[in-house]
Image: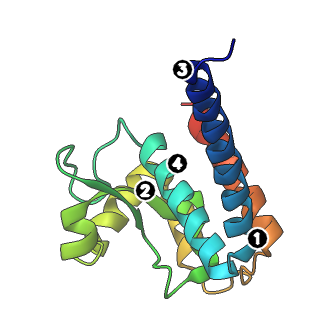
Amino acid sequence: MVTDECVGAFLSDLTKANDKRWAKEKKVRKEALKTRPEWLKDLQDVFNSYIRTRDKDKPCISCGTFTGKMNAGHYKSVGGSPELRFNELNVHKQCEYCNTHLSANLIEYRIGLVKRIGVEQVEFLERKDHAPLKLTVEEIKEQIKVYKEKIKLF
């Protein structure tokens, strides 16, 4: 004999299954509608997370503090040098104060960068002959996977 309780449990399980299916389908649909700039933002978020994870035991590249909110600060800015946007040598953990309120605190950033990666690498970043970076959506998706995997290694 089927009871109201059994029917209620069955309908509840069916609703949960449908909700899960719809959530997956909605995610697929949303991703299909994403524009290249939206994918770039997703890559930037994952890349920045990787930088903060990679540098978790290091101080702010500019001022040396370990306290406060930390960002992934670019030595050469995304606007001024978009080709270096995802270059790991160009991006390091930086406190919110230096990154935002002191506009990257670039003089101190450079001093810290020379100590961390060496003067030759800093001069490489400062050159003006870097090839443009124009990632396709597929390349962006691949880079997102790469940086998610790199984060897992820490």
Marks 3 & 4, CB-CB < 8 Å contact: no
- Viewer-side residue, 30 vs 7: 7
The residue drawn where x is 67% and y is 40% is 149
What is the C-alpha distance between the residues marked 4 and 1?
A: 25 Å
Q: Amino acid at mark 1?
A: Ala
Q: Label 3 to label 4, Cα distance in Å?
A: 49 Å
Say left or right for 78 vs 129.
Answer: left
Query: Which residue occupies the extreme front position in the image?
Result: 1
Give the Cα separation between the discs numbered 3 and 2. Answer: 58 Å
In front: mark 4 or mark 1?
Answer: 1
Residue 29: image x %, image y %? 73, 66
Disc 3 element: helix
The residue tagged 3 is 5
| Dot 3 or dot 4, earlier in sequence | 3
Report which residue position mark 1 lands on: 32
Q: Quadrant of the N terminus?
A: top right
The residue that mark 2 highlights is 92
Mark 4 = which residue?
A: 50
Instruction: Identify which amino acid the numbered label 4 is placed on.
Output: Tyr
Query: Helix, strand, or loop for circle 1?
Result: helix
* Foreground residue among 31 and 29: 29
Helix, strand or loop for disc 4: helix
Say if 77 sits above or below 139 in the image: below
State which mark lies toward you, 3 or 1. 3
Q: Is residue 120 visible?
A: no
**111 shown above or below 52:** below
The crowding category of the residue bearing disc 1, from other C-alpha atoms within 10 Å (few below 14, some 14 to 19, many at least 20), is: few
Disc 3 or disc 4, which is closer to the eye? 3
Tell me if mark 4 has few (under 14), some (14-19) or many (20+) residues whose alpha carbon lies within 10 angstroms of its own.
Answer: many
Coordinates of residue 134 in the picture (x, y in percent): 75, 81
